[in-house]
Image (cartoon, rainbow, N blue to C red):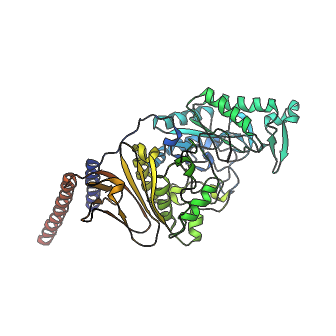
């Protein structure tokens, strides 16, 4: 084994052990059924990973509009990648028999798309996800389906639909028979496959009353099922979706020193108690331009921009939804360019950053669902508090082009406290003037856990001593080796 690599690993392990030894994160129950506890990773089955050639019926990886071969077995094979990212829910798009790779041109709601795999393989994937403590969500397109949908081809159903553009049709959702058929289709699916969530897409002209009928029927089938949408709606979804959120956060985080005055807009109603539905927090989605595109247009380094943006979003009140490929800074301005097949050969430190950030969030109920208070917000410098009866955090987002200092008053966190930085490994204590001085490099997000002052950090000192011993031992070994070589 490479000695230098071994030493670096030992150093990292020692410092991590010292951090764990001095901080305790309040854990929530392992099993929760509230969407505010979740973080969602949004994928397209066809564009994730092609494992099985047996279902590659008509693929063309060179055509951005064609099937590329991704399948259920591919997701199962790359489950360690999902575990590294540590999201609690995987959203797989539409998996129904379809004419298009994204599953939107549904041909038959009662069948699984054969290019994704078999019904058995889908069930196996769901089982694998659940074994690894990940939930699964699937899209159910209500409208904009294929003109060759099996219902449309039945002679008795000529009055069930209207034509739409691109060889698509929309259902007449005011028709009671259509309503009954759609409700039965999605409820039967949930009954057959143990998914944890349904995202209703392509709502079209479906009115709120009908959508609420679908939601009610789904909840009756499974009371713990999440039902959301990727469109703005007044229906009783579990999550508040606002398409302006993407524009808001892209404008704030695409570059440094941007106007951040609107940072609270996506979740303000939730924080103020005006709604009990948490907000969907996104820097892009499957229908928008990628966040990488926005930052690249500003001549900024996308990986750094992504880490700053996600560092903020994953510590704000709401449910983070992250599009597949964000972890490798995937680019694109519009569909299907934005739906490139995921390149697993690309190595970026964004993956480990997301995983570390998610690990802290998943362990801390306060970071997910605790109270929130904005302390500072000026041109990219944001400082806010997440707190509960059990613990308190200070999050500092330095989205500026220079090192920033923030003086934290003891009235916020109390006297004789320590702030432990999760990423920079620094400890902030009260100064002589009674304040806590936070100092953070440019384009960095830090999470400070507030604890009681404990004096000398014994575990840290032991770990530091251990590091020095290893280093000295390494030097001695090199000197001895050099002497032996000289004698020879």
Kindly identify the residue that appears in the image at 47 percent across and 35 percent down.
32
Image-based side of 339 in relation to 432, left or right: right
Query: Does the rendering let one see residue 318?
Result: no
Q: Nearer the viewer, residue 160 or 418?
A: 418
Residue closest to the far front: 411
Q: Position of residue 447 (x, y in %)?
A: 38, 56
**Residue 389, located in which quarter of the rendered image?**
top left
Image-based side of 454 in relation to 69, left or right: left
Q: Nearer the viewer, residue 432 or 199?
A: 432
Query: Does the rendering let one see residue 149?
Result: yes
Q: Position of residue 416 (x, y in %)?
A: 25, 54
If the image is split into quadrants, where does the N terminus sit?
bottom left
Kindly identify the residue that appears in the image at 57 percent across and 56 percent down.
265
If the image is split into quadrants, where does the C terminus sit?
bottom left
Whether residue 385 is situated above or below residue 481 in the rendered picture: above
Whether residue 8 is situated above or below residue 112 in the rendered picture: below
Whether residue 109 is situated above or below residue 51 in the rendered picture: above
Q: Position of residue 378 (x, y in %)?
A: 48, 67
Q: Position of residue 88 (x, y in %)?
A: 49, 42
Q: Nearer the viewer, residue 488 or 86?
A: 86
């Amino acid at each position: 084994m490479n000695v230098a690599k071994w030493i670096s690993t030992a150093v990292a392990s020692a410092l991590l052990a010292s951090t764990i030894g001095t901080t305790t994160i309040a854990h929530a129950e392992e099993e929760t059924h509230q969407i505010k506890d979740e973080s969602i990773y949004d994928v397209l089955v066809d564009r994730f990973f092609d494992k099985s050639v047996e279902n590659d019926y008509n693929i063309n990886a060179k055509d951005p509009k064609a099937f590329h071969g991704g399948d259920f077995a591919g997701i199962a094979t790359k489950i360690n990648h999902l575990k590294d990212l540590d999201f609690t829910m995987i959203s797989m798009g539409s998996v129904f028999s379809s004419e298009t790779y994204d599953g939107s041109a549904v041909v038959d709601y009662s069948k699984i798309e054969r290019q994704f795999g078999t019904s058995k393989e889908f069930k196996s994937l769901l089982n694998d996800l659940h074994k690894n403590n990940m939930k699964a969500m699937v899209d159910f397109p209500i409208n904009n389906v294929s003109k060759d949908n099996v219902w449309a081809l039945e002679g008795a159903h000529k009055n069930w639909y209207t034509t739409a553009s691109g060889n698509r049709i929309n259902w007449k959702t005011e028709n009671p028979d259509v309503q009954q058929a759609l409700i039965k289709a999605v409820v039967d699916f949930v009954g057959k496959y143990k998914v944890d969530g349904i995202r209703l897409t392509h709502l079209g002209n479906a009115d709120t009353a009908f959508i609420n009928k679908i939601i009610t029927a789904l909840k009756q089938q499974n009371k713990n099922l999440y039902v959301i949408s990727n469109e703005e709606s007044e229906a009783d979804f579990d999550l508040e979706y606002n398409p302006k959120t993407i524009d808001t956060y892209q404008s704030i985080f695409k570059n440094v020193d941007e106007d951040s005055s609107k940072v609270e807009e996506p979740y303000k109603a939730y924080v103020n108690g005006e709604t009990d539905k948490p907000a969907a927090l996104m820097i892009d989605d499957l229908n928008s331009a990628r966040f990488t595109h926005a930052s690249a247009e500003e001549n900024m380094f996308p990986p750094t921009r992504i880490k700053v943006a996600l560092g903020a979003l994953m510590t704000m009140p709401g449910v983070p939804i992250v599009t597949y490929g964000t972890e490798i800074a995937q680019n694109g301005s519009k569909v299907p360019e934005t739906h490139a097949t995921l390149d697993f050969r690309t190595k970026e430190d964004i993956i480990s950053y997301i995983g570390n950030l998610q690990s802290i969030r998943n362990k801390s109920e306060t970071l997910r669902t605790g109270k929130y208070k904005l302390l500072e917000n000026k041109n990219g410098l944001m400082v806010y508090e997440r707190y509960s009866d059990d613990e308190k955090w200070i999050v500092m987002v330095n989205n500026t082009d220079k090192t920033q200092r923030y003086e934290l008053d003891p009235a916020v966190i109390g006297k004789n406290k320590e702030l432990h930085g999760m990423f920079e490994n620094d400890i902030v204590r009260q100064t002589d003037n009674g304040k806590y001085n936070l100092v953070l490099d440019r384009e960095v997000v830090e999470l400070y856990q507030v604890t009681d002052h404990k004096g000398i950090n014994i575990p840290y000192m032991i770990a530091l001593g251990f590091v020095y011993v290893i280093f000295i031992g390494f030097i001695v070994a090199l000197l001895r080796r050099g002497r032996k070589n000289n004698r020879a």
